[in-house]
Every structure is written in C-alpha cells, then in structure tokens.
Image (cartoon, coloured by chain):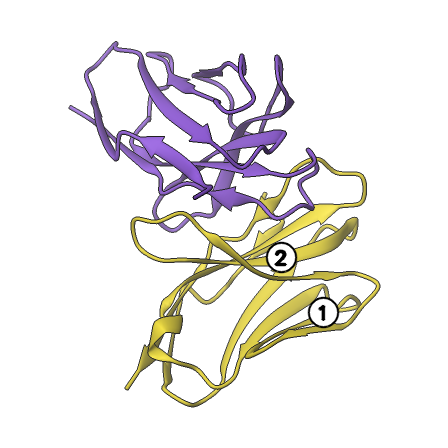
Amino acid sequence: DGGITQSPKYLFRKEGQNVTLSCEQNLNHDAMYWYRQDPGQGLRLIYYSQIVNDFQKGDIAEGYSVSREKKESFPLTVTSAQKNPTAFYLCASSGDGGPRETQYFGPGTRLLVL
Amino acid sequence: DQQVKQNSPSLSVQEGRISILNCDYTNSMFDYFLWYKKYPAEGPTFLISISSIKDKNEDGRFTVFLNKSAKHLSLHIVPSQPGDSAVYFCAAITGGGNKLTFGTGTQLKVEL
C-alpha cells in the first residue's frame, strides 16, 4: 500500500558529524517537503521540492541540505553547521506540486545529539 | 513572527461533548486554511480545510468556521470521542503561496 516511509525512527548525532535522514514515497507525488518540529512549536519548513532535480529553501534551511535525484526520494542532511539539531523531523509529499494539495506525512525521525 | 497562533496549548473535554479548537492569524493574505491531527510519534494527518470564500465547511463530526474579519478560525468536533485525543495544528497559505504556515498546536484530551 502507498505511503511515506522515513528512516531511521531515532538517530543520534555526534558533535561535528553530518547525518542523513531518509524519506521515500510511493504515492507518485511530485512535491516533497521537510519540516522540523520542536516542543511547543508548530511545524517549520526546512526545504521543499516541487519537481525532480529542483528544490527551494524554506524558513529554516541554514545547516541543512537536500537532494532530489529521484521522484520517490528526498533525503535531508543535517550538517555540522546546524547548531541545534535535536528535534522531530517530518517528511511530507503532495500531489501536483502545490501546497494546497493535501500533504501526506511520514512517521518522522527523532534526531538526538550525543 | 508567529503568523498563525493557537493560544490554547491544551484542551480537555468529556466524551460526547463538543470540542472547540481555536486558531488566529495575522496575515490578511492567507486565503486557504487547513487542520491537521497528530498522534504521538506519528506524522500529522489532514483533517479538513476551508477556503476564504467560505465561512463554514463540514465533514462528518468535524466543522471548521472561518471569520475573516476577526482573522479567526475554529474547529468543532461533535460529539468528541476518546480517539480524537491528539494534537491539532491549524495551517494557512496565501494566494499564490508555495508553503504552509503552521500554528503551534493544541493538545486535545477527550476523557471518558
């Protein structure tokens, strides 16, 4: 059945280390999104991609990077430049590239710093 | 600058009663609004939406009301059920915009 998968469920990062969060969808959606959720805060957009090989910065892109080489995949790298990476990361996708389309979310990855 | 605000971080309601979740916004360019529901350790799921050309949209037990002059929307759940216990986020988008702006969420607890 179709959906969005994120892995791993929990991820630990050491100081100065880059880590990559996986997001895969089999919904044949054009648009994909990465959000960050911190306690007591709403979801904040990190990066989004409306088509393959193209992506745009969201509101809090500093310290993160993405790629969109395949329609199904939108990995997020948390670089060492991100000084406060501990958060819950959510990936989403939507149908025709427009955010008014219903966004379907994955189960999330919780990133913790050691 | 929090353009979408949910001022009640939590709400407790008895089963069978009405739950009213509120959301205020400051950007008058927002013209489409959505509600998402989130269980712990899961991603949010879409619940209901409303365009600014309407003032009400209904889907089963869920109704969203929009008051454009007050820049306020609310989600009504009637009757509330224990399975409705979750965090509810409102979100908004401007006309021609390319991203959603989310509120901070309200934790709803429906008690037996």
**Shown colour of chain B:** yellow
Q: Residue furthest left?
A: A114
Q: How busy is the neighbourhood of tag 1: few (under 14 within 10 Å), some, or many (20 plus)?
A: many
Disc 2 and disc 1: Cα gap in Å? 11 Å
Q: Residue at x 37, y 24 (%)?
A: A22
Residue indicated by mark 2: B34
Who comes first in sequence, dot 2 or dot 1?
A: 2
Q: Quadrant of the N terminus of chain A?
A: top left
Q: Position of residue A76 (x, y in %)?
A: 42, 21
Give me the chain letter of mark 2.
Answer: B
Please name which of the two marks, 2 or 1, marks the residue nearer to the observer.
2
Residue indicated by mark 1: B66
Q: Residue at x 62, y 57 (%)?
A: B34
- What amino acid is at disc 2? Leu
Is the residue A54 above or below the residue B32 in the image? Answer: above
Q: How busy is the neighbourhood of tag 2: few (under 14 within 10 Å), some, or many (20 plus)?
A: many
Q: Residue at x 37, y 12 (%)?
A: A81
Dot 1: what SS?
Answer: strand
**Shown colour of chain A:** purple
Q: Residue at x 37, y 42 (%)?
A: A38
Q: Residue furthest right?
A: B53
Is the residue B34 above or below the residue B75 in the image? Answer: above
Please identify the quarter of the rendering in which residue B84 is found. Answer: bottom left
